[in-house]
Image: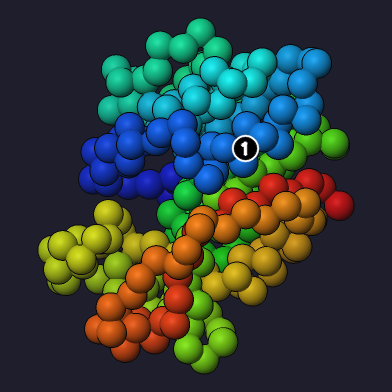
Amino acid sequence: MGNRLRDKQSDSMFIFCSKQRVPITYDTLATIGFLKLEEGKELFGLDIGGGIGTFSEIISENIDCKIDIIDPSKSVINKFSKSKNLKLHSTHLEDFKVKKKYDFIFINLVLHHIIDKDFKTTYNKQINFLTQSLKYLKPEGKIFIQENYYESFFGNDWTGKLIYFLTKLKFIEKLTRKLGANTAGEGVRFRSHKSWEEIFRKCGMKNIIEITVPGVWNLSLLEKFFLLCCKRYQTLKILTLK
């Protein structure tokens, strides 16, 4: 499988989510605000798993920059942004052969889709994905990682592990898809804050800024009980190489 961003059957949902990006959200505003600190020079960015380019288009409309987008979905091609500041590379990260270093890299809500057959190999694959991504970052460059966090009642990573297990089960795929899992039957690997931090450190990155979406997503009592989850939230991290 390599470092696949997703399976084909989920393409339509990812394209739909990409279309829903709007200018005034915590992540777009934070990204624009931070990159404005670099104004005065043209910046070059890489958006890994950027879909039809809506997020990067918003950024490039507010910052003097050019952005390359990696997305393997053939469905993206005909729907891709018409912005002259964006360029689509219809491929997987492992097949991306551009010999170039970038000022910034976006990995927005992608890492939890990098999965494998079990917990250990999924952990290694996520680290490998980040390591490959960082090869394209300039030494002084910044990496923007947006992810969802699930915190267990027990202060460990049990909720992420449980979601991974349930979303991989083929025989309950219709049920988990109805419950909101857009990768039902394929699997998804969310993590706790501590678990994501461990991966980022292992890849040689350090935090500059962490911005959490205002408020915490509400969980029903059933979700709390069934997923062993006390809270879930979304965070944008801006990191650099150590």
Q: Position of residue 120 (x, y in %)?
A: 55, 72
Q: Residue furthest top?
A: 84
Q: Position of residue 144 (x, y in %)?
A: 64, 44
Q: At numbered mark 1, what does the secondary structure look like: helix, strand or loop?
A: helix
| 101 lies above or below 204 | above
Inspect this view and state whether residue 190 appears.
no
What residue is shown at x 37% (from left), y 20% (from top)? 80
What color scheme is it? rainbow
- Res 172 → quadrant: bottom left
Mark count: 1
- Res 102 → quadrant: top right
What residue is shown at x 62% (from left), y 17% (from top)? 66
| 240 lies above or below 190 | above
| 3 lies above or below 160 | above
Q: Residue furthest bottom?
A: 154
Q: Position of residue 137 (x, y in %)?
A: 74, 35
Inspect this view and state whether residue 63 appears.
yes
Decide if residue 218 is on the left or right side of residue 181: right
Q: Nearer the viewer, residue 174 or 213?
A: 213
Residue density around tag 1, few if under 14, some if 14–19, many if 20 or more, within 10 Å: some
Q: Amino acid at mark 1?
A: Thr
What residue is shown at x 34% (from left), y 63% (from top)? 187
Decide if residue 226 is on the left or right side of residue 52: left
What residue is shown at x 72% (from left), y 20% (from top)? 43
Q: Badge 1 is on which residue?
A: 31
Q: Position of residue 11 (x, y in %)?
A: 28, 40
Decide if residue 209 is on the left or right side of residue 223: right
